[in-house]
Amino acid sequence: MDLGGKVFVVGGASRGIGRATATELVSAGARVVLMSRTAEAVEAAAAELGERALGLAADMAAPDTPERVRAAVGGRVDGVVVNSGGPPLGRALDVSDEDWRGSYELLIGGPLRLLRALVPLMGEGGAILFVTSSSVRQPIGGLDTSNVLRPGVAALAKVLARDLGPRGIRVNSIAPGRIDTDRLRGNDRARAEREGRDLDEVRAASAAEIPLRRYGEPAEMARVAAFLLSDAASYVSGAAIQVDGGLVSAIP
Ligand SMILES: NC(=O)c1ccc[n+]([C@@H]2O[C@H](COP(=O)([O-])OP(=O)(O)OC[C@H]3O[C@@H](n4cnc5c(N)ncnc54)[C@H](OP(=O)(O)O)[C@@H]3O)[C@@H](O)[C@H]2O)c1
């Protein structure tokens, strides 16, 4: 895949899926602005990728982020990966109003503001990719902020695909199942503590529910992301692609 000369913004890029995606894009020749909150971590991640990567400490939910990202990309953007950390764990009635509002800002409000700033810098051939979750198809136990809001993000990707298609901009989403990142390890740890079980046992039982019988690697998400952002996927828009080893069995 040749992404030479293209410029991408990747959110949540100091670790996990975002970092793997930034790595894949840079290795295909692109320039990438990596964005996440902790300056030291995002700068270190960018430094590891070399001179075509720039680290920017910015919070997806913060009101000044869009202008700061816009300034960092310098005039033109070919693709945006809308990604960050996930929303907090909890059951619907237990999650505080503040956490519900924060989850909205993280998953929908912040991304809308970011895209308002960046879409005007995108032209024909541009691509937007939302990282969502298997919760867009099937609720995940104990993660109701995601179960409620992620389907809205999938819908946002659909309406943007319709609105931006006439300008030659494609919009898609990818839904990870269980990808072995810090977030998944943290969720597994919380579950082990909650249920008084051994962490390795929780992880083995969780992997056993997946038809491919293992967690995915961040690089396995990143390869699909890079394809969807590339011209090789030039007629793919409005699609929601699961990268989950077969975890979600809902039809269609
Ligand atoms: N891993 C999975 O199996 C899985 C499954 C379903 C859905 N997902 C979703 O996929 C996304 C990425 O997950 P991951 O597993 O790669 O997570 P991760 O390993 O925890 O990495 C999250 C990244 O996002 C950054 N981040 C967190 N909050 C942010 C914010 N407000 N603004 C900007 N950057 C922020 C983090 O850095 P800082 O903390 O320094 O900001 C980090 O770089 C999440 O939304 C997650 O819910 C993941």
Image (cartoon, rainbow, N blue to C red):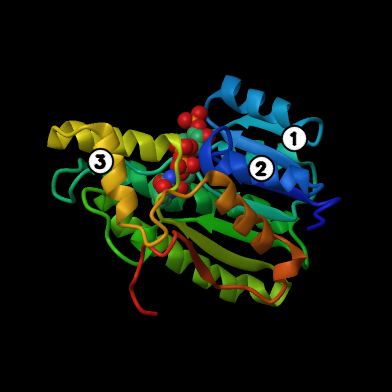
Query: Residue 53 — which label?
Result: 1
Residue 140 located left or right of residue 11: left
CA separation in Å, label 1 and label 2: 8 Å
Position in image of residue 132 (x %, y %): 45, 56
Which of pointers 1 and 3 indicates the residue nearer the eye? Answer: 3
For label 3, the residue is: 202
Which of pointers 3 and 2 indicates the residue nearer the eye? Answer: 3
Amino acid at pointer 3: Val
Question: Could you tell which of marks 1 and 3 lies nearer the N-terminus?
Answer: 1
Mark 1 residue's CB less than 8 Å from ligand 1: no
Position in image of residue 63 (x %, y %): 51, 39
- Residue 23 visible in the displayed image: yes
Are there few (<14), some (14-19), or many (20+) residues within 10 Å of tag 1?
A: many
- Residue 61 visible in the displayed image: no
Look at 25% across and 52% down and name the residue there: 144
Q: Are marks 3 and 2 in contact (CB under 8 Å)?
A: no
Question: Could you tell which of marks 3 and 2 lies nearer the N-terminus?
Answer: 2
In the rendered view, tell whether residue 17 sits above or below residue 176: above
Quarter occupied by the N terminus: bottom right
Number of marks present in the image shown: 3
Q: Nearer the viewer, residue 101 or 148?
A: 148
Look at 13% across and 49% down and name the residue there: 93
Question: Could you tell which of marks 1 and 2 lies nearer the N-terminus?
Answer: 2
Q: Are marks 1 and 2 in contact (CB under 8 Å)?
A: yes
Q: Nearer the viewer, residue 23 or 152?
A: 23
For label 2, the residue is: 22
Q: Nearer the viewer, residue 31 or 183?
A: 183
